[in-house]
Image (spheres, helix red, strand yellow):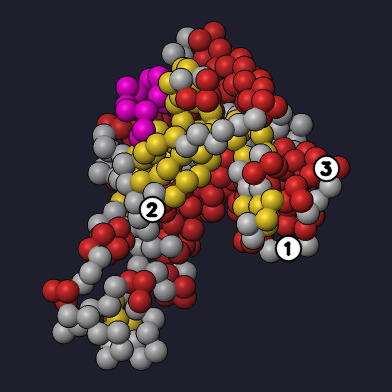
């Protein structure tokens, strides 16, 4: 009998049986399956998403469609919401062809036990006119209790923090859990970078996938730093293709990218945030070693200590593996220091509230 690795299972004559394809094309004897980890990431992994609201449910949906885990648990405190959304998503499995088993639970952390990755989206989102920082009082209490319950049942999980103000919630998690700093990753820069690429591509009249760009610093309207100097279009610096006024506009649009959507939607966005969170989870589960801007605890890197803030990091199976040094110029260094100062100011509320 021959077995096709998941990535190759849609061969021309492939017949799908319970997620595996038996076919005469691309034949590989079972004992010679070359990449065991490619198999295992899907068959063995368990992922939990806490908070089944807009971002959590979208993230879970992306995770299922990417088949990153055999088991996916969606948890919320609102009775029936996770169960309903999980069932709705499972009813797309036969249509979309994924094998992940999604379970929805109300506040039952025993069902999340043994998760490899836990994504935390619980909390309240921004309302129009509200800054991410204004959410701190409510969300800090929620995140602190959620992370305690998560670790009780999944002590080895990599934690992906989404709840806002994300830099401060990541810091709170690092300070209160005692986990190695590499196992707590805040997602914000990946979303902001995707928005940056969107605005760059619109200004260039190009495809977003042909553009590279990175946003570092805090995940806030005034703290994020779109690195226009390093952005490229098919390897060509965008600074040679767009004039400085256009580049400044792209940076400004990126910085208020979230607020623009909040104004239009009446709440904060979810498609791109959910997809960005799932992309980060994918890099962890598949041990991709991809570099993405993420919020991590700095201990001297980029001239900062005792803070969680967005920098380029390499992501692997156990969390983040190393911080890349992008050799910022003087203006970028100054912007980063200013951003860190603002994040620190928000973090100080945690001390005031005696949460750390
Ligand atoms: N980091 C980012 O890039 C990013 C992007 C968008 C949104 N966010 C943040 O993500 C969070 C979620 O946003 P959303 O739009 O999905 O909000 P939402 O209101 O749609 O969903 C939040 C969910 O959390 C649940 N919840 C509240 N307290 C809980 C608890 N103690 N345990 C479990 N679940 C609990 C709520 O019942 C709700 O279903 C917000 O804080 C938002 O600001 C972050």
Of the numbered discs 3 and 1, the one sitting upstream in the chain is: 1
Q: Residue at x 39, y 89 (%)?
A: 12
Q: Quadrant of the C terminus?
A: top left
Gap in Å between the C-alphas at discs 3 and 1? 18 Å
Q: Name the residue carrying label 2.
A: 288
Residue 182 in the magenta stretch? The answer is yes
Label 3 CB, ligand 1: below 8 Å? Answer: no
> Where's residue 180, x and y in %?
32, 28
Which is in the foreground here, disc 3 or disc 1?
3
Q: Name the residue carrying label 3.
A: 244
Say which element carries label 3. helix
- Residue furthest toward the left? 31
Gap in Å between the C-alphas at discs 1 and 2? 27 Å
Q: Residues within 10 Å of mark 1 (few under 14, many from 20)?
A: some
Gap in Å between the C-alphas at discs 2 and 3? 35 Å
Q: Residues within 10 Å of mark 3 (few under 14, many from 20)?
A: few
Of the numbered discs 1 and 2, the one sitting upstream in the chain is: 1
Q: Name the residue carrying label 1.
A: 206
Give the magenta range. 173-183
Left or right: where 178 falls relative to 97: left
Tell me the tag on residue 12: none
Q: Are marks 3 and 1 in contact (CB under 8 Å)?
A: no
Q: Say above or below: 240 vs 50.
A: below
Q: Say above or below: 173 vs 356.
A: below
Q: Quadrant of the N terminus?
A: bottom left
Q: Residue at x 32, y 46 (%)?
A: 317
Q: Quarter-wise, where is residue 70 in the image? A: bottom left
Which is in the foreground here, disc 2 or disc 3?
3
Q: Residue at x 66, y 48 (%)?
A: 231
């Amino acid at each position: 009998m021959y077995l096709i690795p998941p990535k190759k299972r849609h061969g021309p004559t492939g017949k799908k049986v319970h997620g595996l394809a038996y076919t005469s094309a691309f034949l590989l004897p079972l004992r010679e399956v070359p990449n065991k980890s490619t198999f295992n990431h899907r068959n063995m992994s368990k992922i939990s998403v806490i908070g089944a609201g807009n971002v959590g449910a979208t993230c879970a949906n992306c995770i299922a469609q990417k088949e990153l885990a055999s088991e996916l648990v969606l948890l919320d405190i609102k009775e029936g919401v996770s169960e309903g959304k999980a069932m709705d998503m499972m009813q797309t499995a036969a249509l979309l062809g994924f094998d992940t088993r999604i379970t929805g639970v109300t506040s039952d952390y025993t069902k999340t036990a043994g998760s490899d990755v836990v994504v935390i989206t619980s909390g309240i989102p921004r309302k129009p006119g509200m800054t991410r920082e204004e959410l701190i009082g409510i969300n800090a209490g929620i995140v602190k209790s959620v992370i305690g319950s998560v670790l009780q049942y999944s002590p080895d999980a990599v934690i992906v923090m989404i709840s806002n103000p994300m830099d401060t919630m990541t810091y709170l998690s690092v300070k209160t859990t005692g986990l190695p700093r590499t196992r707590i990753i805040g997602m914000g820069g990946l979303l902001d970078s995707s928005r940056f690429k969107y605005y760059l591509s619109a200004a260039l009249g190009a495809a977003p996938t042909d553009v590279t760009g990175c946003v570092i610093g805090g995940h806030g309207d005034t703290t994020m730093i779109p690195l226009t100097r390093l952005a490229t279009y098919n390897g060509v610096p965008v600074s040679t293709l767009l004039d400085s006024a256009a580049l400044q506009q792209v940076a400004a649009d990126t910085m208020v990218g979230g607020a623009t959507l909040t104004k239009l939607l009446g709440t904060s966005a979810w498609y791109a945030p959910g997809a960005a969170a799932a992309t980060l989870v994918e890099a962890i589960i598949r041990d991709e070693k991809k570099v993405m801007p993420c919020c991590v605890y700095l201990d001297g890197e980029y001239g900062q200590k005792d803070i969680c803030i967005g920098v380029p990091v390499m992501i692997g199976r156990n969390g983040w593996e190393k911080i890349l040094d992008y050799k910022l110029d003087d203006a970028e260094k100054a912007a980063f220091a200013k951003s860190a100062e603002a994040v620190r100011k928000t973090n100080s509320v945690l001390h005031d509230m005696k949460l750390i």
